[in-house]
Image: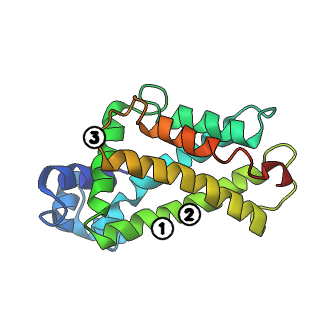
Amino acid sequence: MEIARAAAGLFMAHGLRATRAEDIARAAGVAPRTFYRYFATKEESLAPLFSAGAHQWAESVRAALAELSVPDALHHAVVRTLTPGVGVSHTSLEWVRSLLRLTDTNPALAKVWAEICQAAEGELAEVLAGRPGAVAAPDSPALRFAAAVAGAAVRVAVESWAAGDAPADGLQGPAALAVRNLETLRDFPWDAL
């Protein structure tokens, strides 16, 4: 995670192209060889940061009260993880905004983001399978589809917010956008999972 934070700081300060893996290693206080032990490319070094947010959301779904329906648990988790001052800081969300903007111009970083989003769907499927009353296995097509739908609702909200200049805590912030996206999924057959 220290390497990931160093990479994010350098990417935001100097840009992705101007930052070398060796620069990241130096900023993180590790040898270049150590950097390459963990990451094949400088873009991959952001994966732990992207993964941390996705994992936090899945864990918030897991921690939601057992009596909540799946849509309500998803809503609870989004508010908890994307609202500044609740589960994330304003600074962290601004980092997310800056890093996601870099994915627009860098295919290698976009690939890292896409891979993390896909992995997050698998983690969310496991969490949904563990909710009270769930009948589907985490690898069932229905549960994988449900996790993908929920994940896409949140991903698109975060990406849409990151592409603009709206404040993180406003009506166009990531939590508000994600809640609206999830509301459109109320009629999804969550109870069949």
Amino acid marked by disc 3? Asp
Q: x, y (%) of residue 26?
A: 17, 57
Q: Using the image, determine if residue 68 lies above or below residue 112.
A: above
Q: Using the image, determine if residue 19 lies above or below residue 82.
A: below
Q: CA distance from mark 2 to mark 3?
A: 28 Å
Q: Earlier in the sequence, mark 2 or mark 3?
A: 2
Q: x, y (%) of residue 18?
A: 11, 64
Amino acid marked by disc 1? Glu
- Residue on which the image places disc 2: 119
Q: x, y (%) of residue 55?
A: 55, 49
Q: Is residue 184 visible?
A: yes
Residue at left offset 30%, top offset 40%: 94
Secondary structure under tag 1 reads: helix
Seen as rendered, the residue at the extreme top is 85
Q: x, y (%) of residue 74?
A: 65, 41
- Residue on which the image places disc 1: 115
Residue 175 placement, left or right of 137: left
Q: CA distance from mark 3 to mark 1?
A: 26 Å
Check disc 3: other Cα within 10 Å, few if <14, some if 14-19, many if 20+: few
Q: Is residue 38 visible?
A: no
State the image quarter where residue 123 is shown.
Answer: bottom right
Q: Using the image, determine if residue 149 lies above or below residue 184.
A: below
Residue at left offset 70%, top offset 50%: 127
Residue 165 got which mark? 3
Pointer 3 and pointer 1: residues touching (CB < 8 Å)? Answer: no
Q: Earlier in the sequence, mark 3 or mark 1?
A: 1
Secondary structure under tag 2 reads: helix
Amino acid marked by disc 2? Ala
Secondary structure under tag 3 reads: loop
